[in-house]
Amino acid sequence: MQVYEHKNLFDVSMFDIPTKTITNPQVILKNQNGEEVKAVMDNQVIVYRPDTLEFMGNSRSTKYKVVDPKELYLTHAKRLTELSEIKENNFSLSNIKIIDKVYEGGRKQHREIQFPDLHKKFDDGSIVNMRSDVFNSLDMSWLYQCFAGAYRDLCANGLVFGGQRMFHVKSKHTKGLNVGATLRQVTNTIKHFEENWQLMEAMMKRQISLKGMAHILANNICAKKMKSKQLLDDTKIEPNYKLLDYFIDKIERESGSLGYTVWNLYNALTFWSSHIDDEFERIDENGNARTIKMTRAGSKPHTARTKREDKIREFMNSKDWNDLINGTYVFTTINPNIAERLPN
């Protein structure tokens, strides 16, 4: 991974990645007799770097459209300078923090912009800054996406918000993708930050027991994919206990400063997505403490981070989460296997 931290919106040197494409390329393959035969890769687009001849990726459709990284981030920079909210609120774009990241030889790119002038302060002493993120890829592994969120400085959490409450565009790399059109929605960046501030205040005020947090976690973000959603009084449910134990550990540790609130639950979620290499102590069946790592062997941190953030957005767009914020979430009898994991 390459990282470049600076303050100049129009410095997109990190994203100057030359690319070329070949549609339906010819390849030479060997048949069962070891003879070389020419073949055509139908309905494929190959992306490569002409300067290094490095293979960047291939699509499963000829509709794939390369979004040039340099042009993308220049367009985003220009759009930010045109925001009427920035002019109305009289804050300077020179007082920003930009973190440009390039992964896997240029296959994936990410620009994060933090706005220290747009911030809110919490009772626990932490400060939340507005941020804007743009993701792009050349190997088709990441959809092009752009969103506005926030950053909590106390624990270095990137605060993820649900797509219904924030500016978030996520588009496939196809011929119909219009980067300029999607970036027009950046206009509501400051408005959405104000809305999310109100949401954060609601989280701090909403009390919830540790048992209640375990209930909603096991029924949502900790639920195993292969099982359909079931009420927790169904003894057949088997959530991801490793992940559930991790969240319970985080919530317990923060309860002294954040209390048993939705805000504590939310920060446990965003800590998980922001700190990919985190670990915690877990008591095994023999009563011995073991250190558990939360990163899968061989996984790429930047890929894991975006997947975790997507899971949080999905959770925050669920009916259960909205009911939790509104105080209308229905708690059924908690499964004994989950209840026994909670501290007395």
Image (cartoon, rainbow, N blue to C red):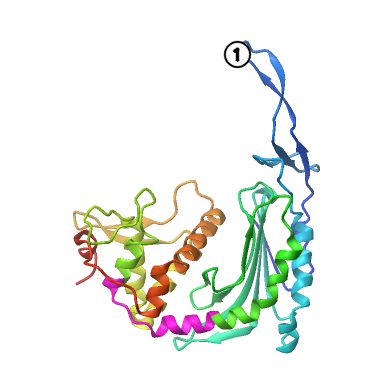
Residue located at (62% from left, 81% from top): 191
Quadrant position of the N terminus in the picture = bottom right
Q: Give x and y (percent) for residue 152.
A: 52, 77
Q: Is residue 265 left or right of residue 214?
A: right
Element assignment for label 1: loop
Q: Nearer the viewer, residue 221 or 165?
A: 165
Asked if residue 82 shows in the view, the reply is yes
Q: Is residue 235 left or right of residue 140?
A: left
Amino acid at dot 1? Gln
Quadrant position of the C terminus in the picture = bottom left
Q: Is residue 147 magenta?
A: no
Q: Give x and y (percent) for residue 126.
A: 50, 83
Q: Quadrant of residue 143?
A: bottom right
Asked if residue 8 shows in the view, the reply is no
Q: Which residues are magenta?
A: 196-212
Residue identifier under label 1: 32
28 relative to 122, above or below: above
Q: Is residue 204 magenta?
A: yes
Residue located at (72% from left, 83% from top): 86
278 relative to 18, above or below: below
By secondary structure, the bulk of the magenta-drawn segment is best described as: helix
Q: Quadrant of residue 284?
A: bottom left
Q: Give x and y (percent) for residue 278.
A: 43, 61
Q: Is residue 287 left or right of residue 20?
A: left
Q: Give x and y (percent) for residue 249.
A: 33, 67
